[in-house]
Image: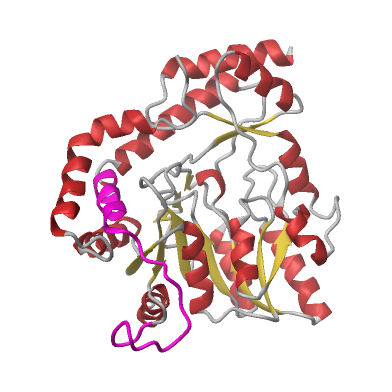
Amino acid sequence: MTIPFIDLKTQYARLKTDIDERIRTVLDHGAYIMGPEIEELERQLADFCGARYAISCSSGTDALLLALMADDIGPGDAVFTSSFTFFATAEVISLCGATPVFVDIDSRTFNLDADELETTIERVTKAGNLVPRCVMPVNLFGLPPDMDRITEIARAHKMMVLEDTAQGFGGVYKGRVSGSLGDISATSFFPAKPLGCYGDGGAVFTDDQQVAEKIRSIRVHGQGADKYDNVRIGLNARMDSIQAAILIAKLQVFSEEIELRQEAASRYSKALAGLVETPYTPEGYTSVWAQYSILSDHRDAIQKALADNGIPSVIYYRIPCHLAGAYKELGYQEGDLPKSETAAKRILSLPMHPYLEPALAEQIAHIVARTVA
């Protein structure tokens, strides 16, 4: 029997009746783009995370891009973000013509380190080549970063905070749900995310009415009063109605699935204690566990041993963004962000989803124990 890294089949079997009925409804009314499901989903998403406005879109990447465009981020601007994340986080900054400035991580949470952020902003400000405009912290693997410190630093430098919660939607920071932690927040509904559709999808969140209206305009080619009244340069970044219908069905059980993820992560941490470095969750934080990621100097041997036993694992992220070939011209060298680089060499993510069999954690622990002995 093949063990799935993310078990979407079991989830679909549970929700099949509701999902199929909602898809049939879309097929019957025929409004495949911007159908009634879009408004319904946006209302439910905003209610879930506590944001005033939710604007759905075509992907998590476009969600970040829409947010940056709404704040007129462009050439000469510096956007500060983590290097230890998926490349899309940095990529959207470049697509706007701005410059990503990479900040090292906290070695325990894997999230942007607020102390490193402050030092990096001061360095860029002193150099005077770029204008600090935005901080984009990432909720890596489902865990929110230290948003109070990050926001305080951003405010001191008159910068926007754009929360990249592509992996973290549903996580909790000091009683607040991710998606409501930034001036603007952006998430992804890629199928592998904790709340995922059956294709690409994303959403942007804000409490600012003018920002929300601008994002809605940019989402549809910069439209004004109608689609032929184009008041700004925009994108084709709408979500399909079928994907919205699927997300509405999944959102009904999302809170329960988050609890199941907590239980799965707890089993892992208990079984693996003393064998590897298990994930750290600060007090007052709740991870949504998009990934369960361990650290070990025996990472490659563990991965091979797991594969030999039919257990999949993934390395996120083998190459930090600051060392990516696409950013060679920025001049970063190996050693510039040591905590990000160390994590990239030692990290391994294990199967994680709400329907994980309890016995799997024990099986993995046995394999790890034999490997590191």
Query: Eyeballing the image, is 211 above or below 94?
Result: below
Q: Residue at x 35, y 67 (%)?
A: 55
Left or right position of 62 against 349: left
Image quadrant containing the C terminus: top right
Give the number of callouts.
0
Q: How is the image coloured?
A: secondary structure
Magenta-drawn stretch contains 277? no
Estimate the x, y position of residue 256 in percent, counting from the top left.
30, 37
First to last magenta residue range = 223-250
State the residue in front, 344 or 228: 228
Q: Compared to 155, does 90 lie above or below?
A: above
Above or below residue 24? Residue 13 is above
Q: Which corner quadrant of the image does residue 263 belong to?
A: top left
Residue drawn at point x = 27 percent, y = 30 percent: 13
Residue 268 appears at what percent x and percent y? 52, 24
Tell me the quarter of the picture where residue 275 sits: top right
Determine which quarter of the picture holds residue 370.
top right
Q: Is residue 93 left or right of residue 35?
A: right
State yes or no: residue 234 in magenta: yes
Q: Horizontal and vertical percent for residue 285?
A: 49, 47
Q: Magenta region's main secondary structure?
A: loop
- Percent across and percent down for residue 327 are 76, 61
**Which of these two is toward me, 282 or 120?**
120
